[in-house]
Image: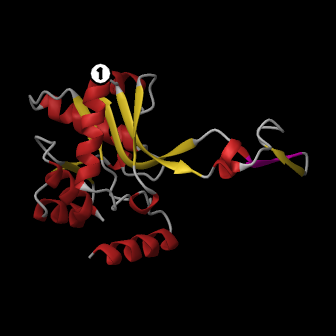
Amino acid sequence: MLAYSIDAAAASHVFDRVVVSTEDEEIARIARDCGADVHIRAAALADDLVSSTDVCIDVFEARRAAGDRYDAVVCLQPSSPLRSAGDVRGSWERFVESGADFLVSVTPVDPHYFHWALREDGGWFRMYFGDAFMLERPLLPPVQRPNGSIKIGRAAPLCERRNFFGERLAVYETPEERSVHVATQFDFDLAAFLMSRTA
């Protein structure tokens, strides 16, 4: 998954530098073999509950301390390996053209999945949004979910806010088949299947 992400970044021709942050020697070796630079992160940033934003800011600050000057940070999580170089390039172009401070890639959500969400309340379940959206799909407003594939932030607002979801937020839509986030064995199997169809 790491190699796919590095390859997409390189093939997009957007970046001056592609950096992989890791504390793991095997991952560092793979990253270097794929042509990326490696930033060895502190063990405190290798925990499952550490946000990708904190890792990105750590890399940015290390590069700045080394004398590099970058206006923006792009996060391509290897857990979203199906993004294409075109998605990366298109996201960057949208970010620049829009004048946004932040951009995230998104995927359309079935409006029933969103507007008809349920929550537990006193042992029974209720519609999360009440009865306001008890409508058929064509009558519901469209919604999108961030898919974790591409996140872009201007350096100053990103370091101040410490996430990629500030007020001046643009989006870049990618289809479901390029928006799989691998967190479970099912996700991995689905991603492998989708990759096999394009190979």
Q: Is residue 196 above or below residue 44?
A: below
The residue positioned 14% from the left and 53% from the top of the image is 10
In screen coordinates, is 181 left or right of 67? right
- The foreground one among 160 and 65 is 160
Residue 188 location, x and y as percent?
43, 71
Residue 156 location, x and y as percent?
29, 21
The residue positioned 50% from the left and 68% from the top of the image is 184
Q: Amino acid at mark 1?
A: Ala
The residue positioned 10% from the left and 30% from the top of the image is 68
Toward which corner of the image does residue 4 lie, by quadrant? bottom left
Is residue 37 shown to the viewer in this render?
no
Toward which corner of the image does residue 165 lie, by quadrant? top left
In screen coordinates, is 158 left or right of 132? left
Give the quarter of the figure containing the N terminus: bottom left
Q: Name the secondary structure under disc 1.
A: helix
In the image, which residues are magenta? Answer: 116-121
Q: Where does label 1 land, which residue?
A: 156
Examine the residues drawn in magenta and state their main secondary structure.
strand
- The foreground one among 164 and 97 is 97
Asked if residue 2 lies in the magenta stretch, the reply is no
